[in-house]
Amino acid sequence: MSTVDELKAKLATLDEQLVKLTAEKAQVEAELKDAERAFKKSALNEIVEKMNALGIDKSEIAEILGLTVVETKKRKARTEKGSAEKKAKGAPKYRNSADPALTWTGKGRKPGWVQLYLDNGGELESLLIKE
């Protein structure tokens, strides 16, 4: 029985070591990524400094590498809010016979009152405003 207890104790010790090593591995991997990122950034900064010192343009580098450089488009400046002229609404072409305040120009989506009228068997021509 003592060998079983010894093996269980050894297994528990190994499990503890495994947990510690796993945590340490994750930490080292994170540090490695940070170090690689910092190294690449410093190398790129050094390359850019040398390019600027030699007067080399990014389009020349892209051409050598077989890449195309897309220039960013400049956005148009916005006008002040409220400075644009309002669009004139069209003249009403149809009027609700039950509520004369409800009108429709005949453009765009049919208002609910027009659709309801048509669904109940009414004709669109009967809603026309007679001038």
Image (cartoon, grey):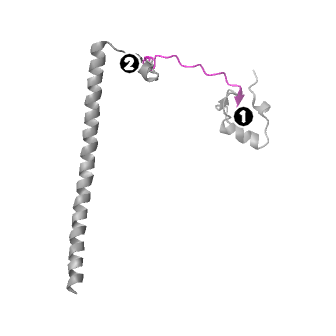
Q: Secondary structure at mark 2?
A: helix
Report the mark closest to the observer, 1 or 2: 2
Q: Quadrant of residue 97?
A: top right
**Magenta stretch bounds:** 76-95
Q: Position of residue 109 (x, y in %)?
A: 66, 33
Q: Quadrant of residue 95?
A: top right
Q: Position of residue 130 (x, y in %)?
A: 76, 24
Q: Position of residue 21 (x, y in %)?
A: 23, 59
Which residue is rendered at x = 66% and y = 21% of the image? 91
Quarter of the figure with the C terminus: top right
Q: Is there a contact, CB below 8 Å, between mark 1 and mark 2?
A: no
Q: Which residue is more in the foreground, 11 or 58?
A: 11
Neighbor class of circle 2 (other Cα within 10 Å; few <14, some 14-19, many 20+) is some
Any part of residue 1 in sight: yes
The earlier-in-sequence mark between 1 and 2 is 2
- Work out which residue is located at the far bottom of the displayed protein and give it: 1
| Residue for badge 2 | 58
Q: Which residue is more in the foreground, 77 or 5?
A: 5
Quarter of the figure with the N terminus: bottom left
Q: Secondary structure at mark 1?
A: loop
